[in-house]
Amino acid sequence: MKKPLTRDLRRCLGATSVLSELGDLRVYDCDGLTIEKRLPDAVVFPATTEQVAEVVRICSRHDAPIVARGAGTSLAGGCLPIGGGVVVMLTRMKRIIEVNVADRMALVEAGVLNLQLARALTGTGLHFAPDPSSQIACTIGGNVATNAGGPHTLKYGVTLNHVLGVEAVLGDGTVMQLGPLGDRAALDLTGVLVGSEGTLAIVTRVWIRLTPNPQDYRTLRVTFDSLDDASNAISDVIASGIVPAAMELMDQGILAAVDEAFQFGFPADAEAVVVIELDGPSVGLDEQRDRITEICNRHQAREILQASDAQQRALLWKCRKMAVGAVGRLSPSYCIQDGVVPRTKLPHIIRRITEISAKYSIRIVNVAHAGDGNIHPILLFDERDADQVQRALAAGKELLEDCIRCGGSVTAEHGIGIEKISLMESLFAPYDLKMMEKVRDAFNPGGGLGLGKVLPSPHAPTLLHAAVSIGDV
Amino acid sequence: MFDSIFPGSETIQVAHQSEVAEVVAAAYAQQRPIYPVGGATSLGLGAVAGKPGTVLRLAKLNQRVDYPSRDLTITVEAGMKMAELAKCLSAEQQRLPIDVASAESATVGGVVAANLCGPRRYRYGTVRDYLLGLTVVDGTGQSFSTGGRVVKNAAGYDLTRLMIGSLGALGVITQATLMVRPVPEMSAFVVVPLPSLEKAESLLASLRTSELEPAALSLVVGDRLADDPDRGAAATLWIGLESSEIEVRWMLDLASRLCREQGLPAVFIDAPDRVASIWRGLTEHAAVRPDQRAATLAVELTVLPSRTVAAAVRLHQFDPQASLLCQAGNGVILAWFSCKPENAGELVTRIRKAAEELGGRVVVTDFPPESRLDRSTIWGPPGPEIRVMQRIKRQFDPEGILNPGRFIFE
Amino acid sequence: MNSESLPITSDRNGRTTLQAAVRPELFLECVHCGLCTSSCPTFTELGDENVGPRGRIYLMRMITDGTLDALPTVRHHLDLCLDCRACESACPSGVHYGRIIEPFRLAMEEEKHRGIAGWDWFRTFVLFGLFPYAGRIRLAMKPVRLMQRLGLYDRFERLGLFKLIPGRLGQMATLVNPPVDQGPKLPSFLPAIGRRRARVAFFVGCVADAMFRHTHWATLRVLQQNGCDILLPEGQGCCGAIHFHAGSNSGARRLANTNVDAFRLDEIDAIIVNHAGCGAMLKEYGLHWQDDRRAQRQEFSEKVRDINEFLDQLGPVAPTGEIRAVVAYHDACHLRHGQQVIDPPRKLMELIPGLELRDLPESEVCCGSAGTYNLNQPEMADRLICRKVENIVSTGAQIVLASNAGCLLQIGREIRRQRLPIAVLHPMDLLDLSYRGEQPELPGHNGR
Ligand SMILES: Cc1cc2nc3c(=O)[nH]c(=O)nc-3n(C[C@H](O)[C@H](O)[C@H](O)COP(=O)(O)OP(=O)(O)OC[C@H]3O[C@@H](n4cnc5c(N)ncnc54)[C@H](O)[C@@H]3O)c2cc1C
Ligand code: SF4
Ligand code: SF4
């Protein structure tokens, strides 16, 4: 059965755009989440929407599951080829088709890198607001599929708020264009596709809303002796009615890693640093900064520094953005969690993280898009030690259940993938999930796209029993 | 009361969310249509109902469920009036920056279902950008929840977005959680009377590419606002500015400089009463007066923002008497034509053709009920994606009892 | 987990085996996040994880673990790596990619060339026979240089006749830069001009001496202007990079030891090198081999400075000669990613009055030269150089600068091929002209 599949794919795309030898497939057995691995039967590199559609049709003829893959930076196992089948790489569809400055929009192919777009926009005075920490590598298609966020989500919103429309291929190979003009005469299918993690359609093109660059910035680095003070200050800033462009928390553990990587000179003994950025017309910024300074001081901030120029600002952001990656310096394996709580619950959940870390003796370091109540506790372990893996997984689960209890959710931006399927049932009632299934069936009747992802199903792997040694397939 | 839109239907009033489920479940069993109605302010949107059924009035479903103001979110029942919501939020210096006409009647659920918004959408966006979660009763009478109460959430499919603008055809919304914003310190207007519609083109272009981030860019042609300083001008551009006082003052300066560069006079308005009255005026302008419905055709035309003026000029050519309210930053034009019922269909066809030439889309938002426009005239011809929408409709409302015939579906 | 040295473990016969080539801990530094992929030239060209850094690390790890055989396709993916180490700059986890791929490839090469079947004339005679010796290179270049002088070269190139010369030799022939006045043989000492600020030794190298002696002269004059006494020790030779990267481990070590012997470290403040490829190699002498001379090589490495880096640290004497030209600076991989020298050359160029330095898009992406890569992987090298030149052209620069012989040759060839009116120079060439108050020769519009 596999042979005819690859033969058909080759016929359609040409031999150089289809991989099917064992030696070529192994690197596609996982993405940024490495605790679970599955081997695909083939990997294809379409160059056009029509080729994507043709691939989908071929797969549906052969009953082969399909996984879309961009840069493969998913932390939720979204690219895992469950049940084998075909990995559709969007990496060769990376044309920026149009940048329309007057209307503040752009049309790009799904494989365009977030950073590539940012670079192409220099000089236009516009930018694409979602700025995930994986910005240097991730694709716009991946951002759309996961509804990616980033530090500046606080003021500017997530990917959803910046997508005007998409071109997408459905499970039966139909190509549809949604948007870009706001359209009342329809259901907001774009809104549903954003964040659907490749399980409803393969996104091939995206109409992006571009945001004007702010005239000016004030970027503050606020150091706190206690994590508690830091999270209380953040909560107070939000409640005060100021909307900073970003408000990011880094704790002592992560600061150590960042400092090792970039020699920024963070104080080693401080429990937390909060990066707060204000942006907008210059005239209004100092006043806002002063209000924030006052709130931070009320919460015993040890030191408040302001980036003095664009270079310092860039370096501060680089540290924040690379923080997650830099954790690799602390431990051979890590699992970055992605919980979200109502913003006033931030101090509570941060305290809980400390407790859970002690309970499971798993070291946890923290970064957080704190202004949104979005925490990223990073659990450190060694994947070669099965016991540690189990404890890390259990700690992560307890933490997320706590988020649910606070009225939050188990993922704010990384998605469910395969990683969090088991939590879907704690988060949603059975009938809520049933409705989601109905939507999936409407887009993707055979279920071939993104098999075993997002919703509980017999195909979903059970992670707690995952094989952990690298190379175990 | 609703006979012109839901001929032969009875009316049921509910006061608890659980009752909604009961009523719909019963209707599902009997395959009897349900027509959900909130504040009855947007009933002109959509075709006249095909079959008699039950008009389900939700306005009594108006409780505030939870308002953790420090989280900047609020959860309310769907029948809460927009004005009531605004009042509740203003006690905490917060607001939902979505303007809808007849806010004393319009309900939260209705605003979501009809995806309404007003002049501030340029800066603040639409319902899509604020709605965090919903509770909905589907076409079988079962209740489900979407989204959540946090401002960022990537768990599962975003059924919340699916419900926005679904016009009661996928489910009856019973509760909504919204993200809210602090009320800005100051609000002001720069008003620019324009000698001709074309003159708006270059001014808008320079405003859109400047550092100015106005809350609204509304171009009014034909019928004027009561606050208009120069009703003799061919058109008036209202530049709404909101932020801290110091920023607003800076923007006022910048805006007037840009106008001067174009040789256009600009009037400042910053007295709070008048500013509030203008926001109200721009918002209410969108409503069709009940006494004029019988002879008015209202359309919403969407083009790329840079083509707004070109589109307005075209509409003006069809009928120099037409009134236009253009959200020029978004490329959305609301246009009203006085029109005899028998001519409505043909006029829509001509407008749609013109819009398509400009790459735009048209939806009829109100029309003389007598003209009985059909679905494809109102909503325009569907693309291949309609198949997915139909499948969703069948999944959510297997018996087709929710608002049958009103929206794009059978 | 920090590995101070590059471990090369051997099998019972003293030969390196693939499985034992890399210490397993080095793999663990990689957390598989994928942030490096977009910096990798081969990944961005082909979009295939197999030819991106994360994929390559994964492949080598699986071979090391014994869960994957070193299949021919796998070897091909690894061969296609430029060893440009852009991924290392991008990696937030601090993965030492070079320390993984280099020994691994060494082992692959050694395995391949074991026995007569793997014998490769090009490798034996050309790479190892020619490159260490500046004299032989100059001799070997003679026919090409003669053709250039006779104007035949152009016609040959246009007709594609170099393609008739067997594969990699033909590639090499086209690389040879057009003749310039190379200047006389280098002396053994040059004194500082003005107050003496430092005493340095200069590393001459092989290709660099044969093809870029004029740049050596420029560099020496710049050093003099900056108050440096310069020693040019006898007995030094090729840095060994070509041997090392082409898999001749022992040859490389021999050359390294020769160089270590040639320099008297206690007499000098620094060893100056002006080509990035050599510089990166010299700086790694202390890392590569475990034997009783390691400490000595380490001391040597610690004294090595790239010329740009050195001048920047010393505080350059500002040049005064105005040069009105638009220039773009290309980051040689071995300087930017290998030595993390990024700003100094740019800062130096900004000192030249009148010079306009424009940002080169993707300046940090490899030009495809990568040591002998353009000889072994011509197709990928071609794609990369085309992209590079496209970017150069987009800046409108009249001069493109690079601090590395390989880049200068690779970019120069493509610019000649496309007949573009752009000069290809080393930053020291330009700095020297400015000190001397002279102007660069800018090509006219027919590409000459
Ligand atoms: C160090 C690190 C930091 C991160 N920081 C953030 C952060 O700050 N914010 C954030 O939101 N995320 C973050 N992420 C997660 C990840 O980078 C984002 O989810 C990103 O949007 C994924 O993009 P990608 O191109 O890598 O997609 P992939 O990983 O390739 O795919 C992700 C999912 O989307 C699907 N998909 C991809 N392309 C398409 C397409 N064209 N059509 C349909 N489905 C598709 C895949 O099937 C998969 O389910 C981080 C990841 C890492 C490793
Ligand atoms: S090499 Fe570094 S950047 Fe690349 S996947 Fe590994 S850890 Fe991530
Ligand atoms: S060294 Fe260069 S070519 Fe090799 S993997 Fe790293 S970035 Fe890619």
Image (tube, rainbow, N blue to C red):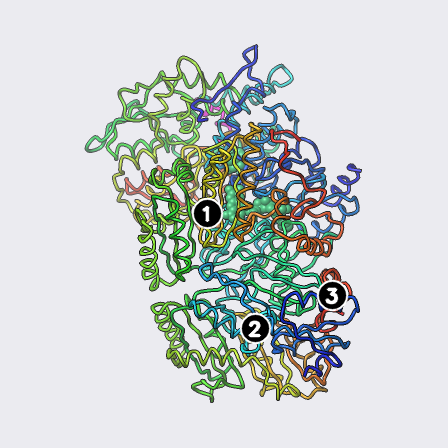
Locate the C terminus of chain A by quadrant.
top right
Expressed as whole percent of the image width and height from the top left, the position of residue A223 reads: 34, 46
Q: Secondary structure at mark 1?
A: strand
* Quarter holding residue C402: top left
Can the viewer see residue A51? yes
Q: Let me know if marks 1 and 3 both belong to one chain.
A: no
Q: Quadrant of the N terminus of chain A?
A: top right
Q: Which residues are magenta?
A: C135-147
Kindly state the secondary structure of the residue where label 3 is placed. helix
Identify the main secondary structure in magenta: helix
Q: Chain of mark 2?
A: B
Q: Which residue is mark 1?
A: A368
Chain of the residue under the numbered disc 3 shown in the image:
B
Name the one closer to the observer, B84 or B333: B84
**Up-down: is A370 above or below C269?**
below
- Residue B266 on image: x %, y %: 39, 80
Q: Residue type at mark 1?
A: Ala
The residues tagged by marks 2 and 1 sit, at their Cα atoms, a distance apart of 38 Å
Q: Calculate the distance from the C-alpha at mark 3 to the C-alpha at mark 2.
A: 39 Å
| For residue C345, side relative to residue C107 (left or right) | left
Residue receiving disc 2: B332
Looking at marks 3 and 2 on the same chain, the residue that comes earlier in the sequence is marked by 3
Please report the residue visible at 63 percent of the width from the left and 72 percent of the height from the top.
B58
- Nearer to us of marks 1 and 3 is 3
Locate residue C329, reporting x and y percent: 41, 43
